[in-house]
Image (cartoon, rainbow, N blue to C red):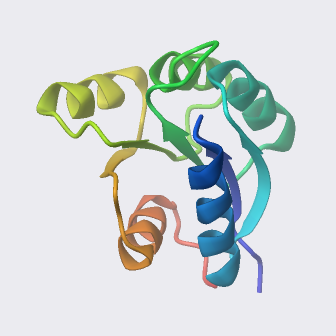
Amino acid sequence: MERIRVIVADDESMICMDLREMLTNQGYLVVGDTGDGRSAVNLARELRPDVVLMDIKMPELSGLDATALIRESDKTTPIIAQSAFAFEDDRRNAMEKGCSDFLAKPFSKKQLTAIIQRNLNPPIAR
């Protein structure tokens, strides 16, 4: 069975580590992680993952601006915005920049896997 390839972008290293562990334990393959938006763009372009988890507030380049740059060359890979700030404006801005969905922190392993599966087109069996 093909493993779903994920990039994790979050400026909090503990969250990156937790997400990597959570995803790996659920059978996903984390092909890269980073703490800034500029690196997230580079990783997405280089590694061509099945899904990107993108924090919206990061240094170098915000997650929203990084999403817009990724969308210039990749219109289909799901990019799931994640943020501790779950205001309606944040959600709307994320969708306008090209995010596929929005996940408010903190979230459970079940919520994370459900949102990833919902955004894969077609869903990849695990």
| Relative to 33, residue 2 above or below | below
Q: Quadrant of residue 106?
A: bottom left
Image spot of residue 118 (x, y percent):
39, 66
The C terminus, quarter of image: bottom right
The N terminus, quarter of image: bottom right
Q: Tell me how many marks there are.
A: 0
Image spot of residue 124 (x, y percent):
60, 74
Which residue is drawn at the image coordinates 70% and 19% (left, top)?
38
Q: Quadrant of residue 64?
A: top left
Question: On the rendered structure, is 94 left or right of 36?
Answer: left
Which residue is drawn at the image coordinates 59% and 14% (left, top)?
61
Image spot of residue 59 (x, y percent):
59, 18
Image spot of residue 107 (x, y percent):
35, 64
Which residue is drawn at the image coordinates 53% and 66% (left, top)?
122
Return the residue found at the far front.
Answer: 14
61 or 65: nearer the viewer = 61
Question: On the rendered structure, is 83 left or right of 2?
Answer: left
Return the residue found at the far left.
Answer: 88
Q: Is residue 51 visible?
A: no
| Relative to 10, residue 94 above or below | above
Q: Is residue 19 visible?
A: yes
Question: On the rendered structure, is 107 left or right of 37?
Answer: left
Which residue is drawn at the image coordinates 54% and 24% (left, top)?
58
Q: Quadrant of residue 125?
A: bottom right
73 or 47: nearer the viewer = 47
| Relative to 27, residue 88 above or below | above
